[in-house]
Image (tube, grey):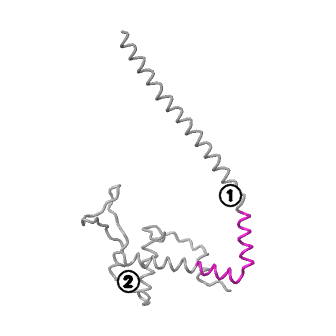
């Protein structure tokens, strides 16, 4: 089985790091919009021009007022037609990755099994170290929680003794 070029291309660093509104962790303005405009040109999709021209829309509450986040900023969302297409690309992408992996497993089962076993063996010391670090951190957290609980109980017990003493002083005075 030859690895398809589109899979090879996914594994090559291209150095571009766009910064902007992300949809499925991919920049909307520099990746998704040009992609879908190109697919419209080629007749693969028929996304409305207003969806491509204004892909971000204000979100509205059920009563028709503009929706705001807890920080006070207006909430925006990607227009449904575009987000549906992006979801379909995502689903197709994951399906193609799974299909590629299945094809490699079917054609090279021994090599794949060796790769899995090698990865498990190489990862085992890391898993053991992480497990030990987690156990130590949990033990420290439990000790700290016990100390805090004891300190809180002691602090709560002290004021009640002082109030009893004050009451006794008031009664005897």
| Predominant secondary structure, magenta span | helix
Residue depicted at x 73% and y 63%: 122
Label 2 element class: loop
Labels in figure, total: 2
Indicate the quadrant containing the N terminus: top left, top right, bottom left or bottom right: bottom right
Q: Position of residue 28 (x, y in %)?
A: 43, 73
Q: Observer-nearest residue: 30 or 98?
A: 98
Residue depicted at x 29% and y 66%: 60
Q: Position of residue 19 (x, y in %)?
A: 46, 67
Residue depicted at x 54% and y 33%: 150
Q: Position of residue 173 (x, y in %)?
A: 36, 9
Furthest-top residue in this view: 173
Q: Observer-nearest residue: 134 or 75?
A: 134
Q: In this rendering, is residue 66 above or below 157?
A: below
Q: Is label 1 in contact with label 2 (beta carbons under 8 Å)?
A: no
Marks 1, 2: nearer the viewer: 1
Q: Residues within 10 Å of mark 1 (few under 14, many from 20)?
A: few
Q: Quadrant of residue 73?
A: bottom left
Res. 103 mark: none
Q: Which residue is mark 1?
A: 127
Label 1 element class: helix
Q: Is residue 107 magenta?
A: yes
> The magenta stretch spans which residues?
97-122
Q: In this rendering, is residue 63 above or below 43?
A: above
Q: Position of residue 138 (x, y in %)?
A: 61, 46
Q: Is residue 114 magenta?
A: yes
Q: Quadrant of residue 98?
A: bottom right
Q: In this rendering, is residue 111 above or below 59?
A: below
Marks 1/2: CA–CA distance: 47 Å
Q: Which residue is mark 2?
A: 47
Q: Observer-nearest residue: 28 or 81?
A: 81
């Amino acid at each position: 089985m030859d690895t398809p070029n589109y899979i090879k291309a996914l594994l090559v660093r291209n150095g571009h790091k766009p910064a902007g509104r992300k949809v499925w962790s991919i920049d909307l303005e520099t990746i998704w919009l040009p992609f879908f405009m190109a697919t419209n040109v080629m007749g693969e999709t028929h996304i409305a021009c207003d969806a491509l021209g204004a892909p971000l829309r204000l979100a509205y509450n059920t009563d028709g007022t503009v929706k705001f986040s807890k920080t006070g900023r207006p909430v925006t969302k990607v227009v449904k037609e575009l987000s549906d297409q992006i979801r379909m690309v995502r689903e197709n992408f994951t399906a193609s990755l799974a299909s590629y992996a299945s094809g490699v497993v079917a054609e090279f089962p021994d090599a794949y099994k060796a790769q899995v076993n090698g990865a498990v063996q190489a990862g085992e010391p890391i898993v053991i170290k992480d497990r030990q670090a987690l156990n130590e951190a949990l033990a420290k957290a439990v000790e700290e929680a016990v100390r805090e609980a004891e300190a809180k109980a002691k602090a709560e017990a002290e004021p009640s003794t002082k109030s009893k003493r004050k009451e006794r002083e008031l009664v005897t005075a």
